[in-house]
Image (cartoon, grey):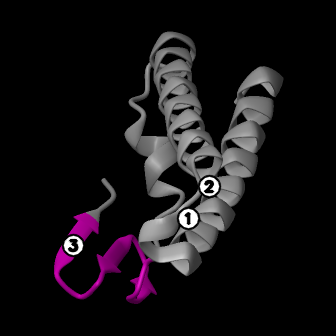
Amino acid sequence: MEKQDKHTLQLREINLRRLQILELQAAQFGINVPPHILLEIEDIKEKILAIDKQLKRSLEFNEGETFQAVKSSQININGNVSGSTIIIGNKNKVQNS
Protein backbone atom coordinates (compact mmCIF):
# COMPACT_ATOMS: atom_id res chain seq x y z
CA MET A 1 0.00 0.00 0.00
CA GLU A 2 1.31 3.40 -0.93
CA LYS A 3 2.09 6.11 1.59
CA GLN A 4 -0.76 8.24 0.23
CA ASP A 5 -3.21 5.37 0.72
CA LYS A 6 -2.10 4.95 4.33
CA HIS A 7 -2.62 8.65 4.91
CA THR A 8 -6.06 8.42 3.31
CA LEU A 9 -6.97 5.48 5.56
CA GLN A 10 -5.86 7.48 8.60
CA LEU A 11 -7.99 10.41 7.44
CA ARG A 12 -10.94 8.04 7.07
CA GLU A 13 -10.45 6.73 10.62
CA ILE A 14 -10.27 10.27 12.02
CA ASN A 15 -13.51 11.17 10.26
CA LEU A 16 -15.19 7.99 11.49
CA ARG A 17 -14.23 8.76 15.09
CA ARG A 18 -15.57 12.31 14.79
CA LEU A 19 -18.79 10.98 13.25
CA GLN A 20 -19.26 8.57 16.16
CA ILE A 21 -18.81 11.39 18.66
CA LEU A 22 -21.30 13.60 16.86
CA GLU A 23 -23.84 10.80 16.56
CA LEU A 24 -23.57 10.18 20.31
CA GLN A 25 -24.14 13.87 20.95
CA ALA A 26 -27.12 13.86 18.61
CA ALA A 27 -28.57 10.86 20.45
CA GLN A 28 -28.25 12.72 23.75
CA PHE A 29 -30.24 15.65 22.36
CA GLY A 30 -32.96 13.37 20.98
CA ILE A 31 -35.29 15.27 18.66
CA ASN A 32 -33.81 18.62 19.73
CA VAL A 33 -30.47 18.16 17.95
CA PRO A 34 -28.85 21.52 17.14
CA PRO A 35 -28.65 22.17 13.39
CA HIS A 36 -24.87 22.60 13.43
CA ILE A 37 -24.46 19.02 14.68
CA LEU A 38 -26.75 17.65 11.98
CA LEU A 39 -24.89 19.61 9.31
CA GLU A 40 -21.52 18.39 10.53
CA ILE A 41 -22.75 14.79 10.59
CA GLU A 42 -23.89 15.06 6.96
CA ASP A 43 -20.62 16.77 5.98
CA ILE A 44 -18.51 14.03 7.55
CA LYS A 45 -20.60 11.30 5.90
CA GLU A 46 -19.96 12.94 2.53
CA LYS A 47 -16.22 13.17 3.29
CA ILE A 48 -16.11 9.48 4.20
CA LEU A 49 -17.93 8.58 0.98
CA ALA A 50 -15.43 10.61 -1.05
CA ILE A 51 -12.52 8.96 0.77
CA ASP A 52 -14.00 5.51 0.12
CA LYS A 53 -14.29 6.30 -3.60
CA GLN A 54 -10.70 7.55 -3.66
CA LEU A 55 -9.45 4.42 -1.91
CA LYS A 56 -11.41 2.19 -4.26
CA ARG A 57 -9.96 3.91 -7.34
CA SER A 58 -6.46 3.81 -5.89
CA LEU A 59 -6.60 0.14 -4.98
CA GLU A 60 -8.13 -0.89 -8.28
CA PHE A 61 -5.60 1.16 -10.24
CA ASN A 62 -2.42 0.51 -8.25
CA GLU A 63 -2.85 -3.02 -6.99
CA GLY A 64 -5.58 -4.53 -9.13
CA GLU A 65 -7.54 -5.28 -5.96
CA THR A 66 -11.07 -4.34 -5.08
CA PHE A 67 -12.07 -2.13 -2.19
CA GLN A 68 -13.23 -5.27 -0.39
CA ALA A 69 -9.65 -5.74 0.82
CA VAL A 70 -9.86 -2.51 2.81
CA LYS A 71 -13.34 -3.28 4.10
CA SER A 72 -12.39 -6.79 5.20
CA SER A 73 -9.68 -5.40 7.44
CA GLN A 74 -12.43 -3.86 9.58
CA ILE A 75 -14.47 -7.04 9.99
CA ASN A 76 -14.19 -8.92 13.27
CA ILE A 77 -13.52 -12.58 12.59
CA ASN A 78 -15.28 -14.71 15.20
CA GLY A 79 -14.01 -18.16 14.50
CA ASN A 80 -10.94 -20.30 14.31
CA VAL A 81 -7.95 -20.23 12.01
CA SER A 82 -6.60 -23.68 11.28
CA GLY A 83 -4.06 -24.34 8.55
CA SER A 84 -5.30 -22.81 5.33
CA THR A 85 -8.98 -22.91 6.32
CA ILE A 86 -10.46 -19.78 7.85
CA ILE A 87 -13.84 -20.12 9.52
CA ILE A 88 -15.66 -16.79 9.67
CA GLY A 89 -18.51 -16.68 12.14
CA ASN A 90 -18.78 -20.47 11.89
CA LYS A 91 -20.92 -20.04 8.76
CA ASN A 92 -18.61 -19.56 5.78
CA LYS A 93 -15.40 -21.33 4.94
CA VAL A 94 -12.69 -19.73 2.85
CA GLN A 95 -9.97 -22.03 1.54
CA ASN A 96 -6.58 -20.87 0.31
CA SER A 97 -5.27 -22.77 -2.70
Height in image: 17 above or below 39?
below
Q: Are marks 3 and 1 in contact (CB under 8 Å)?
A: no
Q: Is residue 80 left or right of residue 4?
A: left
Picture coordinates of residue 78 (x, y %)?
A: 40, 87
Picture coordinates of residue 45 (x, y %)?
A: 51, 40
Question: Which stretch is magenta?
Answer: 77-94
Tell me the kind of residue under disc 2. Leu
Residue carrying label 1: 23
Residue carrying label 2: 19
Callout 3 crowding tier (Cα within 10 Å): few <14, some 14–19, many ≥20: few
Examine the image and state in which quarter residue 62 appears: top right
Which dot marks residue 93?
A: 3
Callout 2 crowding tier (Cα within 10 Å): few <14, some 14–19, many ≥20: many
Q: Residue at x 76, y 35 (%)?
A: 6
Marks 3, 1: nearer the viewer? 1
Q: Are marks 1 and 2 in contact (CB under 8 Å)?
A: yes
Helix, strand or loop under label 2: helix
Examine the image and state in which quarter residue 10 appears: top right
For this rendering, which residue is in front, 66 or 94? 66
Picture coordinates of residue 96 (x, y %)?
A: 33, 58
User: Residue 92 magenta-drawn?
Assistant: yes
Q: Residue at x 58, y 28 (%)?
A: 51
Height in image: 18 above or below 55?
below
User: Residue 6 magenta-drawn?
Assistant: no
Tell me the kind of residue under disc 3. Lys
Tell me the kind of residue under disc 1. Glu
Q: Residue at x 29, y 84 (%)?
A: 89
Q: CA distance from mark 1 to mark 2?
A: 6 Å
